[in-house]
Amino acid sequence: MTNKKYRGRIAPSPTGFLHIGHAMTFWRAQERTREAGSSLILRIEDLDRARCRREFADAIIKDLHWFGLDWNEGPDIGGPFSPYVQSQRRSRYLDAWKKLRVGGFIYACKCSRKDVAEASLAPHDENEEPIYPGTCRTPAPSLVSTAEIVAAAPAGSHWRFRVPDGERIDFVDEHVGKQAAVAGRDFGDFIVWRRDDVPAYQLAVVVDDAAMRISEVVRGEDLLVSTFRQLLLYRALNLAPPKFFHTRLIVDESGERLAKRRGALSLRALRESGAVPGELRAYYEKKK
């Protein structure tokens, strides 16, 4: 990796104290950035207003520094693509929503999460959203003019991206190799804006990674399917996608993925217990 324009990022959510699994994924992102001799960006993804808390956002910076991470741009030090906190970037997401609306890529949806789960046409993994059955999907894209959109607002309905049913989408992951999925079979129409007037993860991460000129996204393998959704958004918004590097997840003794609710494995708890970051990194590297 010798590309001088390489830009990596770490993007934690302040919904709890970060655990060792997060830290190891972020460590891999930092290693990839250092190998390229380039910049690492810290972005705080705090769009979930019901779960995000200031104390967790403050802890992210302290605990990641303790673990051995440093970044070149972020909310604590600034940078050319500020702000680095998603709750302060709403106007950018709204502009993207308008582009998708004008292009006929999205449609309003009244279905609740429960409605979709009960009506889903295909089984789904517990960590993956069910395939939307198309209850609110219009027969054809509804094109609207830019003038109509200027005065419009997305609040009050979910807005779903209309996936091109039957299209095979491919990409080569920098870690796990070639990946492929079929739209409408492996994943369905997905939410880009929530009815409580909050941009969804899929849209926000695409907008921010493009705006911040991220060249490679390093994250856990649990987000592999999300990559296909995001590739469709990059295409619809006429943005160049980054490369992707999906790492294996660290699991607990029973083989289950780690969760923030497991406080004993949080960076904060490990730090307060006197754990040594270098020893932690060496131990968990062997488990991956």
Image (spheres, rainbow, N blue to C red):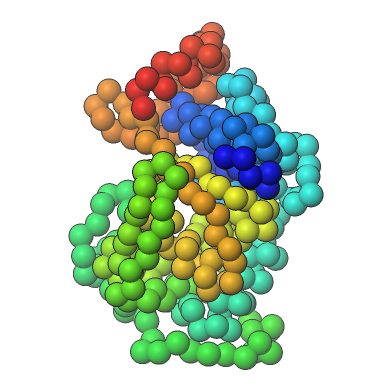
Which is more toward the observer, 243 or 23?
Answer: 243
Vertical placement of residue 28 versus 226, above or below: above
Which is more toward the observer, 63 or 248?
Answer: 248
**The C terminus lies in quadrant:** top left
Which is more toward the observer, 52 or 8?
Answer: 8
Residue, x 27% and y 49% (percent of image)?
126
Vertical placement of residue 175 versus 169, above or below: above
Outermost residue toward the top?
274
**The N terminus lies in quadrant:** top right
Answer left or right for 56 relative to 108: right
Answer left or right for 234 relative to 80: left
Q: Position of residue 226 (x, y in %)?
A: 42, 56
Residue, x 37% and y 81% (percent of image)?
137
Residue, x 41% and y 53% (percent of image)?
172
Answer left or right for 60 relative to 104: right
Q: Quadrant of residue 146?
A: bottom right
Q: Position of residue 259 (x, y in %)?
A: 39, 34
Residue 249 visible in image: yes
Q: Quadrant of residue 77?
A: top right
Residue 61 visible in image: no
Which is more toward the observer, 125 or 224?
Answer: 224
Q: Position of residue 3 (x, y in %)?
A: 63, 44
The number of numbered badges drawn on the structure is 0
Q: Quadrant of residue 34?
A: top right
Vertical placement of residue 94 versus 57, above or below: below
Residue, x 45% and y 45% (percent of image)?
174
Outermost residue toward the front?
2
Q: Position of residue 53 (x, y in %)?
A: 60, 40
